[in-house]
Image (cartoon, rainbow, N blue to C red):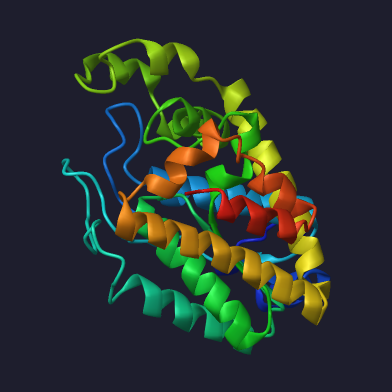
Amino acid sequence: MSRDTVQWERMLPAEFRSAVDALPVVFLPLGTVEWHGEHNCLGLDALKAHALCVLAARKAGGGVVHPPMYGGMGGLDKPATVVMEPEMTWDNYLLRPWLEKLCYEFHRQGFRAIIILTGHYGHNQQIVVRETAARMSERLQIPVLGTPEYWLAQDVGYLGDHAGVGETSLMMYLLPDLVDIRRIRTDPEYGASDAIEKGSSPELGKRYAELIADRLAKVAKAMPRWSEAKLEAFIRAERALVSAQVKGWRKHSPWAAWQHIPERGLVHYGAYLADERFDEIEKMAGKLL
């Protein structure tokens, strides 16, 4: 029997060993259960991140995709939404230790790099994920990347949204049976105009998804071979982003750092990461506030 699987929970032990031998990288998709309009499924964030990780691992020719983690910081005050920890706090008792424990376990299993991709990206979810990844990179001395998926495709117009054109288009391409765009017409909020219905398409979703997966695959193949100097440069860059985001949160507003990304043309994180231009990421962080 020949099977093409990169999903940890679906692998036989021999398949797991083969995937790790081919590329000792583990992908950890994050999300939550949250309202995403009448037109999208409630598990969109985690399902989207998982599908992108699977696509990236297949493009990379190895690696293992962990089952998606449902549960994160924040969530809309809407029906069918599970809020594990409040949105307006950076301190938390669930997400950070959960991620830390998984990183330790992945390291114990012999993985040489970890990619944490969050499809749920309230401001504090983003901060905790990136901060934990940078700190665990230093502690374990293997690269740990923690980022929202949209940061990898901002330069082609995907700036992140909530059940808007970007996420809806990704679902139309990745998991089309879990989106029904016609139902948006009965939604008084998301259907208030026809912008999402007319702007979303599988073709746009493919453009975003393929670029995100290509960049993830490229960095995944490189990460296990990074030198100590390159790892240190990566950590400095990621810590600089965290610092800017936290400073903005404390001194201005929760979204202060993010608001400057498109208006100042700071949309090249994905390209810089894939090309290992960590000095450019560090410079970008210095311009966020």
Q: Is residue 220 above or below residue 41?
A: below
Where does residue 252 sit, x and y in percent of width and height?
31, 50
Give residue 187's quadrant in the image.
Answer: top left
Residue placed at 51% from the left, 48% from the top? Answer: 288
Residue nearest the viewer, comparing 176 with 229: 229
Image quadrant assignment for residue 246: bottom left
Residue 234: x and y in percent read: 69, 68
Residue 273 location, x and y as percent? 71, 54
Q: Judge from the rendering whether residue 129 lies leftward or rightward of residue 151; answer left or right.
A: left
The count of marks equals 0
Among the 4 quarters of the image, the one containing residue 24 = bottom right
243 vs 41, nearest the viewer: 243
Residue at point 46%, 48% (across, down): 47
Q: x, y (%) of residue 183?
A: 30, 19
Residue in the image at 60% along x and 62% along y: 7
Towards the viewer: 253 or 91: 253
Q: Quadrant of the N terminus?
A: bottom right
Position of 12 with respect to 1 (left or right) is: left
